[in-house]
Image (cartoon, rainbow, N blue to C red):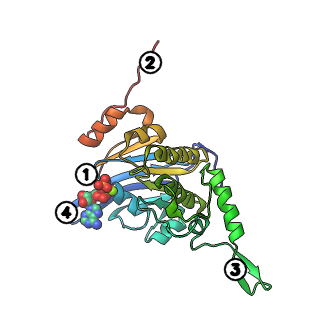
Amino acid sequence: MALHTPGGARSAPPIVAMRGISKHYGGVAALDKVDFHVGRGEVVALLGDNGAGKSTLIKILAGAVRADQGTVAIDGREVEIGSPAQSKALGIETVYQDLALCDNVDVPTNIFLGRELRRPLLGGVLRLFDRRRMAQETRRLLGDLRINIADIHAPVRDFSGGQRQTIAIAKAVYSDANLIIMDEPTAALGVAQQEQVLSLIENLRARGEAIVLISHNMDDVMRVADRVVILKTGRLVTDRPVSDVDRQQLVRMIVSGVEEPPLRREVLQ
Ligand SMILES: Nc1ncnc2c1ncn2[C@@H]1O[C@H](COP(=O)(O)OP(=O)(O)OP(=O)(O)O)[C@@H](O)[C@H]1O
Ligand SMILES: [Mg+2]
């Protein structure tokens, strides 16, 4: 797992830059010439009302949907994302709301699913799962991310929604992802569980991870996002630092689809 320098070199190209992305479904423009980028160590909130195009934009990055028009560049290099496997290979991990965890197995098994660590036996004739090392790595990972799970060998169905969400995010982090996309990570969570996920996002940002956060919760957005991007019926409404908006303005722009001038906070002389 690479540790990046938060706020790294200013001149570095964004981790992901999407340009002029359009996608039509029949007569409906789900996306209309949308630009979207995410830099290293940046949390970008992707906002918009129902049907705004958020999921479609994310699905294009995740390789689940192909754009009709536009380009995607990773680290300044133009790429084709033709499948979910290609998206993963490019270092893009998506944590969907319906968590892709296996309920009846423990935390290490979930984290290492399909990429199990093995140890040689009989001079390498057999290669068995190295459960001890996977448990060690899991404890280290959870410790690094300050995720508090007392018994990693309990089946994950025994954990709370918040713990499960943090495990799913930890799994994405362990993939050495360049970009982690989270679709409504705190929806349907209790207050304490939301807090767990939000502080995990803050820890990830401090480590220099790039994050896209889809959320309908303006408090979450104001707290953890560096930048907000608002879509309305497939069009870009605004893309600006979170310091240039307040909660009310965000809600107004999401509903109206009309960009408002950047908020000028009063400076006391
Ligand atoms: N597979 C599809 N077939 C037809 N139309 C689609 C399809 N997927 C999305 N759309 C349409 O594209 C538009 C954008 O949808 P999208 O799911 O991207 O919105 P969203 O911003 O994620 O909304 P929500 O907040 O409700 O999840 C909508 O009008 C939707 O009906
Ligand atoms: Mg959606």
Q: Quadrant of residue 125?
A: bottom right
Q: Residues within 10 Å of mark 2 (few under 14, many from 20)?
A: few
Which residue appears farthest toward the top when viewing the image? 269
In the depicted structure, whether residue 84 falls above or below residue 190? below
**Tag 3 residue:** 128
Which residue appears farthest toward the left when viewing the image? 27
Mark 1 or 3, nearer chain start: 3
| Tag 1 secondary structure | loop
Tag nearer the camera, 1 or 3: 3
Disc 2 marks a residue whose amino acid type is Val
Measured as percent of width and height from the top left, residue 24 is found at: 26, 63
| Tag 4 secondary structure | loop
Whether the residues at callouts 4 and 3 have beta carbons within 8 Å, the answer is no
Q: Residue at x 57, y 74 (%)?
A: 114
Q: CA distance from mark 2 to mark 4?
A: 48 Å
**Tag 1 residue:** 233
**Tag 2 residue:** 267
Whether the residues at callouts 1 and 2 have beta carbons within 8 Å, the answer is no
Q: Residues within 10 Å of mark 1 (few under 14, many from 20)?
A: some
Mark 2 or 4, nearer chain start: 4
Measured as percent of width and height from the top left, residue 52 is found at: 29, 52
Q: CA distance from mark 1 to mark 2?
A: 36 Å
Q: CA distance from mark 4 to mark 3?
A: 54 Å
Mark 1 or 4, nearer chain start: 4
Label 1 near ligand 1 (CB < 8 Å): yes
Whether the residues at callouts 2 and 3 have beta carbons within 8 Å, the answer is no
Mark 2 or 3, nearer chain start: 3
Q: Residues within 10 Å of mark 4 (few under 14, many from 20)?
A: few
